Amino acid sequence: KTGWMKQKTINQLEEPAATKAKGLEEHWNFLQKGRAALKAADQTKYNVWKHDPKHDNRRQAATLLAKEAATLFAEATRQRELLAAAPINDALQPALYGASKQPSGVKATSATRGNECGPSGGGGGAAAGTSLMLDALCICAKDSNEASGEKNCGKDWASAPYSNNWTPKTAAAALVTGIISKCHLKTKPKTIARAALEAASTAFMQRLGEPRGDNKNLRLMLGAIEGAGGAGCTGQHNGGAGPCLQYKPAYFAGDEPSLPWMVQLHTAVSQLEAAEAANRRLKEIDGQLKTLNTSLAALLHTTGPRSATPLATSDSRHNPKQCDTHTSKQTCTENNCKWEKKRWKI
């Protein structure tokens, strides 16, 4: 007979099963799946064990172990979700490319480089800080008025795509990927980590804090500027301008910098740390589940207690021969025997 294996919802149970299942509502489906996973040979053993009244205490203990296992299993399911790479990449891609999350989307709203990268007056560029690659374009990309482009970012920029003129409003996927390739020539890809990000952020802020221009009064600026720098980051290195970027002061008004790409990098690190913590916790859960499984197996496979048998009693009234050994009334009565002159009566 296999009807006992048919799964029921907890609301379909009848008495006395319904009463015994109280408190298992949250874990019912999990427990049913576990029972259904039993091998055929174990199903018969389980059915006998389940209905044997001698195993009531063991069944109660098994129920508690199963509930604990179900709780751990549910936690493991939540922890595994934190291992997904998608949340980490969802933070890294905007940091690198901006909202589009791809090289072709690295572009600004207007075509005016000075407005997007850093206008005159020191107010900060509209697009400066929105992504690492747009910042790189403000500093590295060739301006149409430059014969060979300003060499902010290294040598050998005379060939395409580096020699192409850059207009902030126009997609420049080839230039973006080209700059990334040149970066890889100078650095080795690393796994993003809190310590590495903090070190890089510190170095970045120190560099950003250096005053620029002949008068040393330009702040929050990276790149090259000519003379006093009053003309802004137009891309052409003359007349007080240059290929540079200048951030808005508002990004640095709080306790921590709020540059969009920096915020995204910190988010990515937090996601990675959560994944690492989840992985450690999953290992702990695995060990706990193995221990529970061992305990549960011991409960299921241990032979149940036999019916209790009367223990041997030391009451002399149940042992006539013992009464015959007493030679005095005192010892006789002390051992529940009856003294009758020189005879002992039980």
Image (cartoon, rainbow, N blue to C red):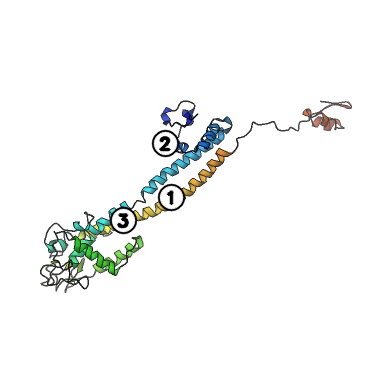
Q: Is residue 258 visible?
A: no
Above or below: residue 322 compared with residue 166: above
Which comes sooner in the sequence, label 3 or label 2?
Answer: 2
**How far is disc 1 from disc 2 in space, using C-alphas?**
21 Å
Q: Is residue 204 visible?
A: yes
Give the numbered dot on residue 29. 2
Q: Nearer the viewer, residue 26 or 13?
A: 13
Give the numbered dot on residue 282. 1
Which comes sooner in the sequence, label 1 or label 3?
Answer: 3
Mark 1 residue type: Leu
**How far is disc 3 from disc 2 in space, using C-alphas?**
35 Å
Mark 3 residue type: Ala
Q: What element carries label 3?
A: helix
Q: What element carries label 1?
A: helix
Q: How many marks?
A: 3
Residue found at the far right of this picture: 342
Question: Which quadrant holds the C terminus?
Answer: top right
Query: Which image quadrant is residue 56 in?
Result: top right
Asked if residue 44 lies left or right of residue 25, the reply is right
**How far is disc 1 from disc 3 in space, using C-alphas?**
21 Å
Q: Nearer the viewer, residue 93 or 338?
A: 93
Above or below: residue 273 compared with residue 12: below
| For the residues bearing labels 1 and 2, Cβ distance under 8 angstroms | no
Q: Residues within 10 Å of mark 1 (few under 14, many from 20)?
A: many
Q: Is mark 2 on a helix, strand or loop?
A: helix
Determine the residue positioned at 48% across, 28% down. 17
Query: Which image quadrant is residue 225 in?
Result: bottom left
Which comes sooner in the sequence, label 1 or label 2?
Answer: 2
Q: Nearer the viewer, mark 3 or mark 2?
A: 2
Residue at label 3? 268
Q: Which of marks 1 and 3 is in front?
A: 1
Query: Which image quadrant is residue 257 in?
Result: bottom left
